[in-house]
Image: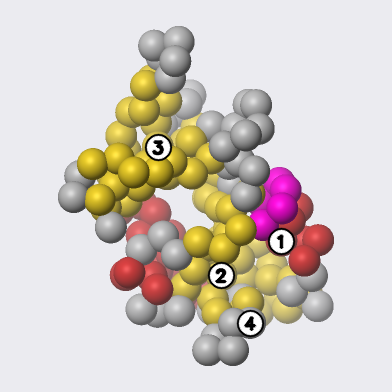
Amino acid sequence: MKDETKAFVVYKGIDLSDNKRKIEVRPFDDELSYLQGLVGGYIEHYIISDELDYKFIDMWIDEEGKLKDGLTPTFALLHDHDLYDVIFGNCVFSKYDLDGNTLGLTPDEVSQVIKFLNDCDVVGLIKKDGSTVPALAVNK
């Protein structure tokens, strides 16, 4: 069911032409197919940071993102500044309740997610061919 007062935040990575973060705000819709369309495949739930989790904000990713050709890294996940995982493809931020339901974000929560994304440092990940691609660094 579409709810125009609530939203998803979709993070699509960094535009290589100008190094700006590609962030979209989309209307909330609780249909599975809608969320799958936003991530580009089968969804997988992910808690990206304690800062957002404390606010009941989580993230959805393409569970096969690492296996698909052509997807670029969006997040470099660090633990004590050591790389432990990389997320590829679109990431969708939403809210959840204690029953595990996915909910839309309020305008204030949308602003919090966008601030979180803009506050993340950009790091360069080196590909097999020696080129570097940017990703947002999140230290857990």
Q: Position of residue 43 (x, y in %)?
A: 67, 57
Answer whether residue 123 is magenta in the image. no
Task: Judge by depth and name the residue closer to the eye, 130 or 120.
Answer: 130
Q: Residue 101 — which label?
A: 4
- Reading the image, the residue beneath label 3 is 135
**Which residue ends up furthest to the bottom in the rendered image?**
98
Q: Amino acid type of disc 3?
A: Ala
Image location (x, y in percent) of residue 100? 59, 82
Q: Is residue 21 positioned above or below 24 on the image?
A: above
Magenta range: 38-43
Can residue 136 be seen in this snapshot? no
Distance from the alpha carbon under mark 2 to that under mark 3: 21 Å
126 up-or-down from 98: above or below: above
Residue under circle 2?
94
- The mark nearer the N terminus, 3 or 1, is 1
Of marks 3 and 4, which one's residue comes earlier in the chain? 4
Query: Residue 52 is drawn in which quadrant?
Result: bottom left
The local crowd at label 1, few if under 14, some if 14 to 19, many if 20 or more residues have their Cα within 10 Å, is many
Q: Residues within 10 Å of mark 2 (few under 14, many from 20)?
A: many
Q: Residue at x 48, y 36 (%)?
A: 73
Marks 2,1: beta carbons within 8 A: no
Q: Quadrant of residue 4?
A: bottom right
| Separation of marks 3 and 4 at Cα, in angstroms | 29 Å
Magenta residue check for 40: yes
- What element does badge 1 sit on? helix
Where is 48 relative to 137, above or below? below
* Mark 1 vs 4, N-terminal side: 1
Residue that badge 1 annotates: 35
Label 3 secondary element: strand
Of badges 3 and 4, nearer the viewer stands 4
Q: Residue at x 63, y 82 (%)?
A: 101
Q: Mark 3 near mark 1, Cβ–Cβ under 8 Å?
A: no
